[in-house]
Amino acid sequence: MLIRLLRTYLRPYKKPIALLVALQFLQTCATLYLPTLNADIIDQGVVNGDTGYILGYGALMIGISLVQVVCNIGAVYYGARTASALGRDVRGAVFDRVQSFSAREVARFGAPSLITRTTNDVQQVQMLALMTFTLMVSAPIMCVGGVVLALGLDVPLSGVLVAVVPVLGVCVTLIVRRLRPLFRSMQGRLDTVNRVLREQITGNRVIRAFVRDAYEEKRFRKANAELTDVALGTGNLLALMFPVVMTTVNLSSIAVVWFGAHRIDSGEMQIGDLTAFLAYLMQIVMSVMMATFMFMMVPRAEVCAERIEEVLGTESSVVPPVAPVTELRRHGHLEIRGAGFRYPGAEEPVLRSVDLVARPGETTAVIGSTGSGKSTLLGLVPRLFDATDGEVLVDGTDVRTLDQKVLAKTVGLVPQKPYLFAGTVATNLRYGNPDATDDQLWHALEVAQAKEFVQGLEGGLDAPVAQGGTNVSGGQRQRLAIARTLVQRPEIYLFDDSFSALDYATDAALRAALAEETAEATVVIVAQRVSTIRDADRIVVLDEGRVVGTGRHAELMAENDTYREIVLSQLTEAEAA
C-alpha cells in the first residue's frame, strides 16, 4: 500500500526527484573520497614530512567538502519541497474523496477517524518521504561505496564487515517486525482519543447538565492510558534499536583496531590506510543506522498508508451521473415512486415502497413516529443517500441523472440539525448564493423571523458566528438556517423538522411568512408537531417506513388510526377538530 501510494503521488515530481538523487550521489561520492585523501596525507605527507603535499591535498579536501555541503543543501531543499508537495496532494485527494461520500460512508468511517487520516496519517507518510529523500537515498550508495573502498584498502581486514553487516541486519529486522502491529494499534487508539475528545467538546452542555464530568474524565483517561501503553511499547523497541546498533559499531571498531595494529606491525598495512578503513567502517555503519532510522518509520507509515488507501479506495454510494442532465423545466415538481432504502447489512429496510407527489404552490407534510424514516425520505431528494429501490424524480428527471449543481439549485434542504459555519451571519446566509445583496439577506431574515435578533447583534450581518453556531440559541440557529435556504431561492423547499426549537408564536408567524414567500414553490415539511403541518395541502403518514395514509388533516383524523393517534398524543379532541 505504501509503495503504491508513493508511486502514484510522486509520479508528477520525477524531475525534482532525479535532480535530488544526482545531488545525493555527488554528495556521497565526495564523502567517500575524503578518507582516501586523508590516508594519502598521513602516509605521504605526515610520515615523510612533506608540507607542500599536506597543503595541496588539504586544499583539495576543502574543495571537495564545499562540493559536499552545496550538494547536501540542494538535496535537502528539493527533498523538502517534494515531500511537502506529496503531503499536499494526498491531503487534497483524501479531502476530495471524503467530500464525495454520502452520509452512509461518513458514518462508516466516523468523523474522528477521517480527521486523523487526513492529518496525522498523511503527515506520517510525508515524514517518511522527507527522510527517504534526505537520508535513505544516500545510505545504500554510502554503504556499497564504503565496502568497495574498504576492500580496496585491505581485503583481510574487511572480514570484519562480513560479520558486522549481517548482525545489524538481523537485529533491525527482528525489532521492525514487532513494531508494525504496535503502530497499527497506536493509530487506532489515536482515533479513539480523537473521538472521545470530540464528543466531550461537542457535548459539553450535556455533560454539565447531567454532572458527568467525572465519568467523562474517566473515559478520556482510559483512552489516553491505552494510547500511552502502546506508545510506551513502541518507544521501548525504538529505544532498544540504537543501543544494539551502537554496541555492534563499537565492537567492530575495536576489532578493526586490534587486527589492524597487527597488520601494521607486520608491515602489511600503513597507518593512513587503517585510519581510512576506520572512517569507511563508520560510514558503512552510519548508513546502516540511517537505514535503521528509516525502518523505524516504515511500519507506522505503512499502516497510515493503508488507512489512507482505505478512504481513497472507498467509492461513494452516491455515484455522479456519467452523462448528467444540466437543464430542467424549473417547475419544481417532485415525485417519489416506490422508493425504498436499506443500509448495508441491515435486516430491515428503513423505507419500503414509498410514493409521494409534491406540486408547486402546495405544501406537502410528512409525519410519523420516531424512526419511521421521515428524515431518510427527505435525504433521498438532494441525494444525501440514493434510494436502493424505486426512483426520485424532479420535474420528471431521476435525481441520479441530474448534474449535482443543478440539483443543488433546484432543491433547498433545511436539515433537522442545522449547522452554521465559523464566520459571520452574512457569510453563512450567502452559502447557497454568494452573489446575494444585503437587501436580499435582510428580506430572508425577516421572513425567517430572525431579522430582529440579528439587528440586535453587534455588527448585524457582520456579527461573528462560532463554529456550529454555538454562540446562538437552537431556535436562532434554525431560523438562520431557514434564512440561508430562502436566500438560495430553490424551486423545492425541504424542511426536516426545522421548526422544532421555535415557540408556538414564532412558529406560527414563520409559517405564515413562508406561505407567502414560497407561494409558487414546492414545499415539503417533516414535523413532529401537529400544529406545524395540520394546514398542509397534503399530509403523508409514515409508519415503520411505509406510507399508511395520505390526505388532509380532517380526512386523516376520520379515516387513519395512526395519524389520529399521533394527533391525540399532542392535542385534545376539541383542539384537533
Image (cartoon, rainbow, N blue to C red):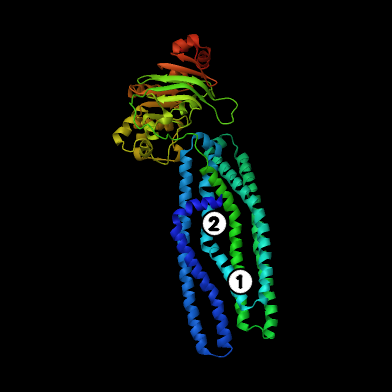
User: CB under 8 Å between callouts 1 and 2?
Assistant: no
Quick check: 550 left or right of 113?
A: left
Q: Which of 573 and 177 is in front in this view?
A: 177
- Read off the residue under disc 2: 128
Depth-wise, is mark 1 or mark 2 nearer the camera? 1
Q: Nearer the viewer, residue 547 or 19?
A: 19
The secondary element bearing badge 1 is classed as helix
Cα distance in 3D space between marks 1 and 2: 26 Å
Image x and y of residue 209, in percent: 56, 34
N-terminal of the pair, mark 1 or mark 2, is 2
- Give the residue type at disc 1: Val
- Read off the residue under disc 1: 147
Image x and y of residue 175, in percent: 67, 57
Q: Residue at position x 46%, y 38% from top? A: 100
Query: Would residue 243 be visible to someone looking at this image?
Result: no
Task: Tell me if mark 1 has few (under 14), some (14-19) or many (20+) residues whose alpha carbon lies within 10 angstroms of its own.
Answer: many
The secondary element bearing badge 2 is classed as helix
Quadrant the C terminus occupies: top left
Q: Residue at position x 65%, y 76% from top? A: 155
